[in-house]
Amino acid sequence: MKSRLWYPQLDPSSAVRRFARLLRLWSKSPETMERLFIADFFLASPNLIDRLQMPSEYRKKYASLGLPKPKDSFLTFPSSSMLFHTMEPVQKEGLNSMAGKALLELSDYEVSKVKLSDEGLAFAEKLENSPRSNIEDVALEFIADIFKSPEFSGKMELRTRSGLRFYE
């Protein structure tokens, strides 16, 4: 019997689920696709949250959450930027799927912003009743919080602190 490892980072349907959960927490205003993709990267790989450049109060909060670190995993992770760029086409496929199913506000999507539509919010609410890991729930709350902080507000701050993109 052969077995396979499943990598949530490379699964478009898993990306849709993570996007819906993140956007439900950010439902007040549209977000850039880049911010969503970077937040999703860390949600899909909670072991790598440790690599974020965080202000000290967030570092303390992160330490208290008990999220796994890269050294605690049986997987060896590639560089963050390599994994992020590998995930990007999968993330785009998931986002296009959400737009095609009217889960996103199309007027925002056309200008590279993302916000859940009413159908998308209903979908995200249903996801909250589905089985999921405790690690994902803890990581989701932390990521949604830190990515809305002033230290991560601008495009360059986001890129610098995440270490995932270095170009203008």
Image (cartoon, grey):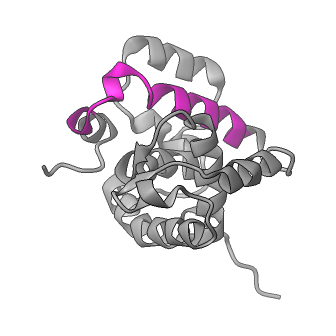
Residue 133 horizontal side relative to residue 66, left or right: right
Tell whether position 138 is magenta: yes
Quadrant of residue 101 in the image? bottom right
Q: Percent position (x, y) of residue 138?
A: 67, 32
Task: Pick whichever, 154 or 109, lies toward us.
Answer: 109
The residue at the far left in this view is: 168
Q: Percent position (x, y) of residue 142?
A: 57, 29
State whether residue 155 is above or below residue 65.
below
Residue 12 horizontal side relative to residue 118, left or right: left
Task: Pick whichever, 84 or 99, lies toward us.
Answer: 99
Residue 136 horizontal side relative to residue 2, left or right: left
Secondary structure mostly taken by the magenta-highlighted segment of the chain: helix
Tell whether position 17 is magenta: no
The residue at the far front in this view is: 107
Query: Which residue sits at x=33%, y=62%?
Result: 82
Count every numbered label the image shows and give the total: 0
Q: What stretch of residues is rendered in magenta?
A: 135-157
Q: Quadrant of the N terminus?
A: bottom right
Q: Percent position (x, y) of residue 17?
A: 67, 57
Query: Which residue sits at x=46%, y=19%?
Result: 59
Q: Percent position (x, y) of residue 132?
A: 79, 49
Query: Which residue sits at x=30%, y=49%?
Result: 164
- Asked whether residue 103 appears in the rendered view, the answer is yes
- Asked whether residue 132 appears in the rendered view, the answer is no
